[in-house]
Structures are given as structure tokens and as C-alpha cells.
Amino acid sequence: MTPTPNLTGSRDRWSGRAPKRMAAGRACIERGCTTKLSTYNRRDTCFLHSPVRFPRIRGRITAGTHPVPTSQ
Ligand SMILES: [Zn+2]
């Protein structure tokens, strides 16, 4: 029974701090999306369905108004 010599000083600082890992094998919660999420992904959605996504510009895609330079 020799006491471990290396345990002096700082207490184990990793105790109680589990690595931020989610359950394995999760899939995106978006309907119809079957993208598997990484265990390190803390979101419930895949990259495509994450909220960071830019919002779609609604109704203002004026068809016919192409940015064609009218050179006269
Ligand atoms: Zn998704």
C-alpha cells in the first residue's frame, strides 16, 4: 500500500467536469433529415439546420428584375 506520490498539489481538476459530449448516434431533429450528429455537436440539428443559418429573404425575390446592366 504505497500512497501515490503524484497526487500532491492540485486536486484533480477534471473531476466533476465531464467532457462535453452528447450521446452517440443522434440524428438531426429536423423532419426528414437523417444527418447523424457528431458527439461533439451540442445542437439537436445538423449543420444545415442549425439556427445560425441565414434567414431566407421572403417574397422579395423579384423575378424579372435581374441585375442586368442596361448599357445604352
Ligand atoms: Zn438536419
Image (cartoon, rainbow, N blue to C red):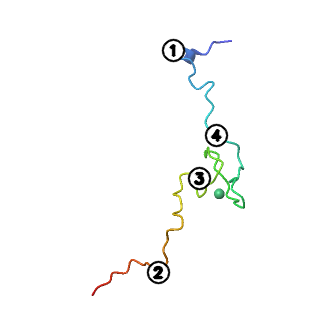
Q: Secondary structure at mark 3?
A: loop
Q: Is ligand 1 within 8 Å of the beta carbon of the residue shown at mark 3? A: no
Q: Nearer the viewer, mark 3 or mark 4?
A: 3
Q: Residue at x 66, y 48 (%)?
A: 44
Verify CB contact (< 8 Å) between mark 4 and mark 2: no
Q: Nearer the viewer, mark 4 or mark 2?
A: 2
* Amino acid type of the residue tagged 3 in the rendering: Ser
Q: Earlier in the sequence, mark 3 or mark 1?
A: 1
Verify CB contact (< 8 Å) between mark 4 and mark 1: no
Q: Which residue is mark 1?
A: 9
CA neighbours of label 2 inside 10 A, class few (<14), some (14 to 19), many (20+): few
Q: Residue furthest left?
A: 72
Residue 21 disc label: 4
Q: Which residue is mark 2?
A: 64
Percent across and percent down for residue 68 are 37, 81
Verify CB contact (< 8 Å) between mark 3 and mark 1: no
> The C terminus appears in which quarter of the rendering?
bottom left
Q: Residue at x 68, y 55 (%)?
A: 36
Q: Earlier in the sequence, mark 2 or mark 3?
A: 3
* Amino acid type of the residue tagged 1 in the rendering: Gly
CA neighbours of label 1 inside 10 A, class few (<14), some (14 to 19), many (20+): few
Q: Secondary structure at mark 4?
A: loop
* Amino acid type of the residue tagged 2 in the rendering: Gly
Percent across and percent down for residue 56 are 53, 62
Q: Nearer the viewer, mark 3 or mark 1?
A: 3
Q: Quadrant of ligand 1?
A: bottom right
- The image quarter in which residue 32 lies: bottom right
Q: Residue at x 59, y 58 (%)?
A: 48
